[in-house]
Image: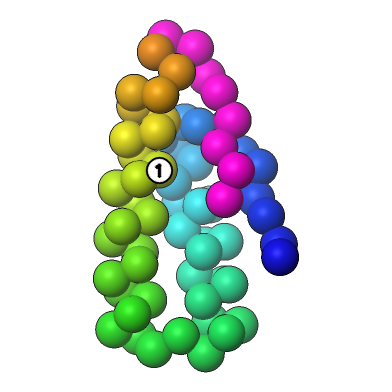
Amino acid sequence: MPTLKIAAKRENAEQVMAFVDGQLEAHDCSIKSQTQLDIAVDELFTNIASYAYGAETGEAVI
């Protein structure tokens, strides 16, 4: 399964979403499900980037 390792910074959310959308499209995910998953992934990544590492920058693996 493909993974994306990326710095957990809010400015990387667009890259995370592009990666997730690419995976969902490759698996013929419906638009409705993709939209719902996009909301969840965006919220999760934003929370990780904002709170998981305090003042430091850690890595997120998608």
Most foreground residue, 45 or 15 = 45
Instruction: Please give the count of numbered marks on the rendered protein.
Output: 1
Q: Main secondary structure of the magenta part?
A: loop
Q: Which colouring convention does the figure follow?
A: rainbow
According to the picture, the residue beneath numbered tag 1 turns out to be 45
Give the farthest residue toward the front: 1
- Which residue sits at x=28%, y=71%? 36
Q: Position of residue 5 (x, y in %)?
A: 66, 42
Q: Position of residue 45 (x, y in %)?
A: 40, 43
Residue 52's quadrant in the figure? Answer: top left
For label 1, the crowd category at 10 Å Cα-Cα, with few meaning under 14, some 14 to 19 and many 20 or more, is many
Give the farthest residue toward the right: 1
- Does 29 sit above or below residue 7? below
Residue 32's quadrant in the figure? Answer: bottom left
State yes or no: residue 34 in magenta.
no
- Does 7 sit above or below residue 62? above
- Which residue sits at x=57%, y=84%? 27
- Which residue sits at x=35%, y=85%? 31
Looking at the rendered structure, the secondary structure element under dot 1 is: helix
Tell whether 34 sits left or right of 16: left
Q: Position of residue 24 (x, y in %)?
A: 51, 76
Residue 55's quadrant in the figure? Answer: top left
Q: Position of residue 6 (x, y in %)?
A: 61, 39
User: Magenta segment range?
Assistant: 55-62
Give the farthest residue toward the top: 55
- Does 24 sit above or below residue 27? above
Amino acid at circle 1: Phe
Q: Quadrant of the N terminus?
A: bottom right
Tell whether 30 sits left or right of 7: left
